[in-house]
Amino acid sequence: MQTRDRIMEAAEQLFGDVGFDATSTRMISESSSTNKALIHYHFRSKEGLFLAVLDRYFEVLSSKLQGAINIDGPITARLLNLISVYMDFLEENINYIRIVQREIMGGKNMERVIKHMGPIFEIILKVMADSYPRAQSGNFRVEQLTISFYGMVITYFTCSDVIKEFLHGDPMSKESIQERKNHLLAMAQIILKVLEE
């Protein structure tokens, strides 16, 4: 693994575990088996490293979600694929959740998160509005549906420690995440069926 990648991997873990402020360049250099000078060489600062980690997550996520929604097939299958791909990404990138949630809750880079998330939401809103005229107004308005499904997906991961108490098991196990995914896909099918009526 290249030095730059080792540094980013260590930083992702630490930023996810303890947050930006509690992570020092010394901690990153020790975890990546490099020296602090290499962090500054590749990223100029801890802030530059943090932004590189954040940007890389969103580049991968955006690519995956656009690929999921742009497949050939009926709109229902494309939207269900979108939910499935998003769940898979979150399962594989748990530090993404921790890092982004901290930023959304008042981090210095909230605007950067919004800048990345905005185009993704716009694509989904356009596809939904074009495909379901009923979703252009009323209780099933596309903006509300998108926010609702975003919340249903993301909350499972951000609140997993609390959910663990309700499920009496590990919500982050493969089986539990698959059960959650199946539930969300079933919920989506019910709502999309209503929109088609």
Image (tube, grey):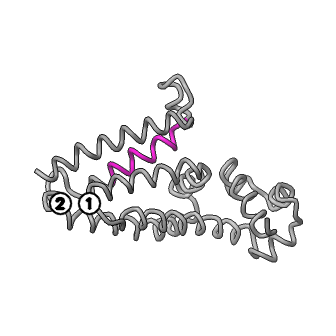
Q: Position of residue 106 (x, y in %)?
A: 53, 57
Q: Label 2: how many residues lie within 10 Å, few (<14), some (14-19) or many (20+)? A: some
Q: Earlier in the sequence, mark 1 or mark 2?
A: 1
Q: Position of residue 84 (x, y in %)?
A: 42, 50
Q: Position of residue 117 (x, y in %)?
A: 44, 65
Given this view, does label 1 or label 2 mark the residue nearer the observer? 1
Q: Residue at (39%, 56%) from the top-left corner?
A: 82
Range drawn in magenta: 147-160
The reply to whether callout 1 and callout 2 are in contact (CB within 8 Å) is yes
Report the front residue among 112 and 79: 79
Question: Secondary structure under badge 2?
Answer: loop
The amino acid pointed to by label 1 is Ile
Q: Main secondary structure of the magenta part?
A: helix
- Pick out the residue farthest to the top: 168
Label 2 belongs to which residue?
A: 132
Report the front residue among 88 and 119: 88
Q: Residue at (48%, 63%) from the top-left corner?
A: 64
**Residue 170 falls in which quadrant of the image?**
top right
Label 1 belongs to which residue?
A: 75
Report the front residue among 32 and 196: 196
Report the front residue among 36 and 56: 56
Q: Quadrant of the N terminus?
A: bottom right
Is residue 162 rendered to the left or right of residue 65?
Answer: right
- Pick out the residue farthest to the left: 197
Question: Secondary structure under badge 1?
Answer: helix
Q: Is residue 127 magenta?
A: no
Q: Position of residue 13 (x, y in %)?
A: 70, 52
Is residue 98 rendered to the left or right of residue 145?
Answer: right
Q: Is residue 43 above or below residue 173?
A: below
Is residue 101 rendered to the left or right of residue 20?
Answer: left
